[in-house]
Structure formats: structure tokens, C-alpha cells
Amino acid sequence: MLVYVTGASGFVGRKLLPRLEAAGYETIGVDVGVDVRDRASVESSLRRHRPDALIHLAAMSSVAQSGREPESCYRINFHGTMNVLRAAKRVCPGARVLLVGSTDQYGATEPRDQAFDENTPLEPRSPYARTKAAAELLGREAAAQGQDVVRVRASNHTGRGQPDRFVVSSFARQVAAIRSGRQQPRLRVGNLDSVRDFLHVEDVLDAYTTLLDPGIPTDVYNVASGHPVAIREILDRLIEMADIDPVVETDPERWRPTDWCVADASKLRRVSDWQPKVSLDALLRELYDDWRTKDS
């Protein structure tokens, strides 16, 4: 079975290809050489490879960047998804297409008694979340017309090698640099009161691989831990891990309004044996050790 992966040189894509190969799949990974904004480019590449399944990772994934570049975000996340779906329908209509979205589509909210399930109305607040929600609607329509499209809403995930423009990796980089003496004991942070659920990237890769199984119904699935964690707790655990006592300063450029986003993955667990395996402490230790190694 040949799996075609867009966005293959990104943080997740670089890890997904070897994971798929270890599971027995053949893989084709594409990135800048196949511009998802150009339908002809996508269609030509799919005709060359004619995959049995497709995982669409190519996206503008930074919420902050999407706020600075909303038009570019629309062209990549929404129009790019449209091109992938249409090209797949023409070239490999029987292929399973996995569209990767985000639990950020649910929107910033006040704390809730229950995590978001897939029936929770979407209220996306950022250009990133809005384009992902709109792209998911394209996938839903394609599925209604007979394409084998599975839509994913993945919660925050991180691990070794994630760029420091993302919150947990940013904290880990700064803490490691302070511990090694490469940075003054001063941490620059955004809003620490927001609450998220976090996964290790390897658990997310497990979910994507699981969802390639044609026995799993075409539908929308959360991929999430379901466990609420305040951003402040993430920072506190890393500071304790490094045994440092830094000054913590709010950076206006990193600050976003307080919100709460925790998702329920019971639906995915009902149709598969997927479960998160990596603990939050193990995840944070991995990131911290990775940045310490880079600093040295």
C-alpha cells in the first residue's frame, strides 16, 4: 500500500514517513516541489505515483503567523486542501484521504465541565483555525459525494525537533539555555492561564497510521489526550526539571487572550485500539534534553 504525504519535510511529516515504513507501507513524501496551491502541480504528482492513501499535512500551522499573513494562510490551508481533494478524486478516487485539522477549530472558550467531542459546534477564532475548519467542510462534502475522506482534529502535539515558535518547545529552549548559561535567567512568555491538552507527536503518528485502516469508518475524529493542562503548569514543570529560578516576563507579541481547549478522543478509541502512551513528564523531559543537546 502506497501512502502519499504532503508537507513531508515539516515537523510531523519528517517523523511520519519512517513510522509508516516501519508499519509496512511504501511512502512518497512531497513538500515544496509540489505546491498544493497549484492544482496542476498536485494532480501531476498524484498521476505519477497513484497512491492508495494520502495524508494531507501541508499547511500554515502557526496561529501567530496566520494572524500576520491571513491571505497566505487561506491559500495554503483552504485552497490547498481543495486542490488535493479534487486532484485525488480525478486521479485516485478510491484512495483514503486523511485531512489533518486541529482542535483549535473549536475556538477559545471559558472552562467547561466536559471536553469537546466531535459534535461540539466549531467556533474558530484565528485565520489558522478558520481555514482549517473551512477545509474540513470541503472534506465533509467530498465524503458525502463518495470519496473516502477521514477528517482529523488533532490537539497540540510536540516532541524532539519541534521549532521553538510553538509554546512548549519555546519554553524548553529558553529553560535549557538558562540552565547552560547561554541565556540570562529571564523567560519571555505569553498567556500562562490558558488551558490545553497535549500529546507527544509519536502518539499522533500512531493515530494517523491507525486511521489509514479502511475498516475505520469515514468520519471526523479528535486525536487528543483529554487531560486539561494549564500553560503555567508546563512552564513550572520545565523550570523544576532544570532546577533554575528565572524571572518570568510577559511578551506582548506572544500574548493571546485566555482560553480553554481540551478534546475528547473517545470516538477514535471506540473504532480502534488507539491510546496515548507517552506521559506529559516524559514529553517535557525529551524536549528539555533535546534543547540542552543543541545548546552544547
Image: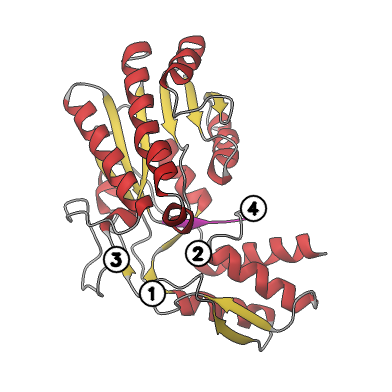
Q: Earlier in the sequence, mark 4 or mark 3?
A: 3
Q: CA distance from mark 2 to mark 3?
A: 25 Å
Q: Which residue is mark 3?
A: 108
Q: Which residue is mark 2?
A: 279
As for residue 77 lying within the magenta part, the answer is no
Contact (Cβ within 8 Å) of mark 1 with mark 2: no
| Circle number at residue 223 | none
Q: Earlier in the sequence, mark 1 or mark 2?
A: 1
Q: Which residue is drawn at the image coordinates 57% and 33% (left, top)?
A: 17
Q: Is residue 277 visible?
A: no
Q: CA distance from mark 1 to mark 2?
A: 20 Å
| Circle number at residue 161 | 4
Q: Residues within 10 Å of mark 4 (few under 14, many from 20)?
A: some
Q: Which residue is drawn at the image coordinates 50% and 13% (left, top)?
A: 49
The kind of residue tagged 3 is Ala
Q: CA distance from mark 2 to mark 4?
A: 18 Å
Magenta segment: 156-160
Q: CA distance from mark 4 to mark 3?
A: 27 Å
The kind of residue tagged 4 is Gly
Q: Is residue 188 above or below residue 168?
A: below
